[in-house]
Image: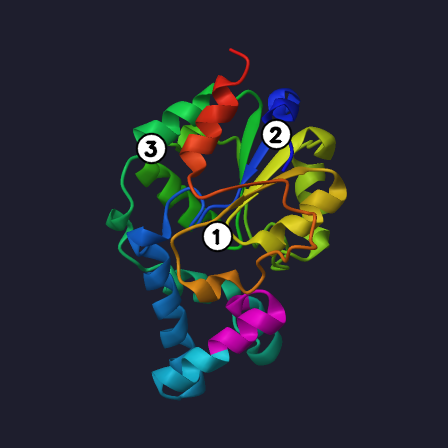
Amino acid sequence: MRPIAELKETESWIFDLDNTLYPASTGLMAEVSSRMTMFVADLLDVEAETALVEQKRMFREHGTTLRGLMNDHAVDPTAFMAYVHAVDYDLVGKNPRLSSVLRTLPGQKIVYTNASVPHARTVLDRLGIADVFSGIFDVAAADYVPKPNPRPYDVLASRHGIDPSRAVMVEDIAHNLEPAAAMGMTTVWVRTDGPTDAYWAAPSEDDDYVHHQTDDLIEWLENVAAYDR
């Protein structure tokens, strides 16, 4: 692991959204995933168990269920997003501690998500941190090319004036950090309390693209903010 001292010069903080800025234990992404399964079941006219197997296959092979549906079934991405994000956002509540520490960090804060801007805005509003972020880079901005494909990372950096050597990227899926590290960003893997099958891309002992890791993002950020005060 790299020392926290190197983060003093950070100019850009890039955060994944779901299961990163809030814990998987809220159940919000479980609802989203369930609605993805329902969408696939309705589209293919199959039972939920069969739809779930197909959903997981598309996720593994295409990076997201949406990309798989677009590639294999020409699904309209806006219709899919509207359907799967019709969930109970009250599951996510305000987090004053997260809000406080984010405001102490110097530099711009950006959300980079494989979901949509409306979903991200709603979640950020629920957390009480929407005004902390200067931008949201969603899957539409990425031309529906999901993480960890390297191409949208370059678009993200160009669009938001990010110097990778002075940027930090935070993610709950470790493999999504690999392109960021290759660009020169410092990476942080958040080990969450979600189901183990979410970690299909967890790093092996030989991988070197995870520079920091934590199972408590807020505590980790507080340690960064308090360093050398």
Query: Does 17 sit above or below residue 161?
Result: below
Magenta-tinted stretch: 55-66
Q: Amino acid at mark 1?
A: Ser
Q: Residues within 10 Å of mark 2 (few under 14, many from 20)?
A: many
Given contact means CB atoms under 8 Å apart, are the residues at marks 1 and 2 in contact? Answer: no
Q: Position of residue 37 (x, y in %)?
A: 39, 74
Q: Disc 1 to disc 2, how far (Cα)? A: 21 Å
Q: Residues within 10 Å of mark 1 (few under 14, many from 20)?
A: many
Which residue position is annotated with label 2? 12
Which residue position is annotated with label 3? 128
- Specify which label sits upstream in the sequence, 1 or 2: 2
> In the drawing, does residue 167 fall left or right of residue 28?
right
In depth, the one of 186 and 43 nearer the eye is 186
Q: Position of residue 26 (x, y in %)?
A: 30, 51
Badge 2 marks a residue whose secondary structure is strand
Q: Amino acid at mark 2?
A: Ser
Please give the name of the residue rendered at 36% of the width and 75% of the height, measured from the top-left corner: 38
Q: Disc 3 to disc 2, how far (Cα)? A: 20 Å
Q: Amino acid at mark 3?
A: Gly
